[in-house]
Image (cartoon, helix red, strand yellow):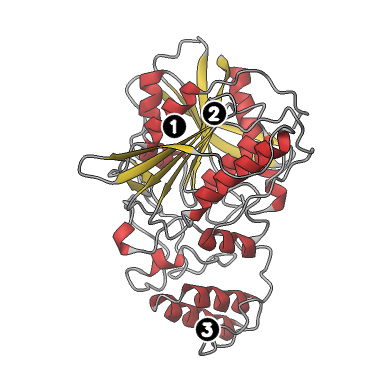
Amino acid sequence: MRDQMQAGMAEATRLTCEGQLAEATAIIQRTLGGTFAPASPDGSGGADEPVEANFRVVDEAPRAASTRCRRATGRRTGAVTRPAPDLPSRLRGLPRLPGGLPGIMPGETEGMPAPAVVPAGGRFVERSYADQAGTRAYKLYIPSGYTGQAAPLVVMLHGCTQNPDDFAAGTHMNALAETHTFLVAYPAQAQNANMSKCWNWFKAADQQRGRGEPSLIAGITRQVIDEYHIADGQVYVAGMSAGGAMAAIMGETYPDLYAAVGVHSGLAPGAAHDLASAFSAMQNGGPGTARRDTPIVADTRVVPTIVFHGDRDTTVHPRNGDQLLAHLAAVNTAANRDVTGASVPPAKIRQGQVPGGHSYTQATYHDADGRATVERWSVHGLGHCWSGGSLPGSYTDPKGPDASAEMVRFFKQHPQREPIERPAG
């Protein structure tokens, strides 16, 4: 069995080096299922075989050299075999073995010093929250200007292989919190929940209110609200990649808790329900399907959402940004009986260019009352990176428009206008 697995992974490595990612994925699936056989000449041969339920999605690194993001650097330890220099980035889109495969499947960077992410006078404290779904650590940034007055709260959900310190450094959200006086909570995915510390956005059990990871993230949010003076109707959630997909889920399942959502390089709620559909959605775009514990009713609102996506993203296809817009339109249609059809409404388009950096297209969508409720930023030339991000954070591209600043601006424009009654959970 061990020889069979080694042979399978060697074949997957060869195919990946040749850029045949779909075939490499199929080989890994068959190898883990104990049925390894070399790929057929046409690249087919078993690609539709069942996928084990305990796979993990690792979705954080682009595979195109021209769109490579800046990454935090650090000394990796524990690797037994070193692949070709570009192989780790190519393999990040493939499933990871339970327990890991040193030197082939990239994991967490070890021995990396925590980046400096605490502006002078601010505090970055470690907390934890537990409920029936488990326990999650988180970090909370408290700006120096907070003295107990009512202040907004932004919840930031990191991507795979990241952590609160890394994500705070890359997004520079703490610096914005210091300038604008709001609190920032950074939930940390547990490695025993996902080996690559991805939020499990693709699992049906983690897409519902009052269950799984949405319950934990909402619990962290409420814990901060209970212990600090958070302004009414000014609680927001944003995320990157797997965290962006989970942020979209949080907005859909907890519209009473979050006033607006930021989704960077993410996917629509319900775009996947297991690993196989996750790969399909990431590579091809996945139409979202509402997954709620209660039916959509007439008082449901589409939570205002700002979407960032690079048009050179080879990890989460840019089509997913369009699918998220279509999903929001469909939810709005289902919730409002006087609206027919589920097409995305016309948008106001603005073109821009970062001096010395990427150009972008900003599309703004309005509701029936003329309020700007959705923004879609397509950043031209951006890969799977946080637009306008900073070093030493990972997966950032400083040449793009500042996604963090634009999200804060959008959030300030969208306080929750009136409470929505929802069941506890």
Expressed as whole percent of the image width and height from the top left, the position of residue 167 reads 42, 41
User: Based on the displayed image, in which of its 4 quarters is residue 18 positioned?
Assistant: bottom left
Residue placed under numbered mark 1 in the picture: 407
The answer to whether the residue labelled 1 contacts the one labelled 2, judged by CB atoms less than 8 Å apart, is yes
Identified by mark 1, the residue type is Met
CA distance separating discs 3 and 2: 45 Å
Quadrant assignment for the N terminus: bottom right
Expressed as whole percent of the image width and height from the top left, the position of residue 419 reads 68, 19
Relative horizontal placement of residue 111, taking residue 412 as reference (left or right): left
The crowding category of the residue bearing disc 1, from other C-alpha atoms within 10 Å (few below 14, some 14 to 19, many at least 20), is many
- Res 131 visible: yes
Up-down: is 230 above or below 19? above
Expressed as whole percent of the image width and height from the top left, the position of residue 185 reads 51, 30
Give whichever of 195, 367 is nearer the camera. Answer: 367
Identified by mark 2, the residue type is Tyr
Which callout, 1 or 3, points at the residue further toward the start of the chain? 3
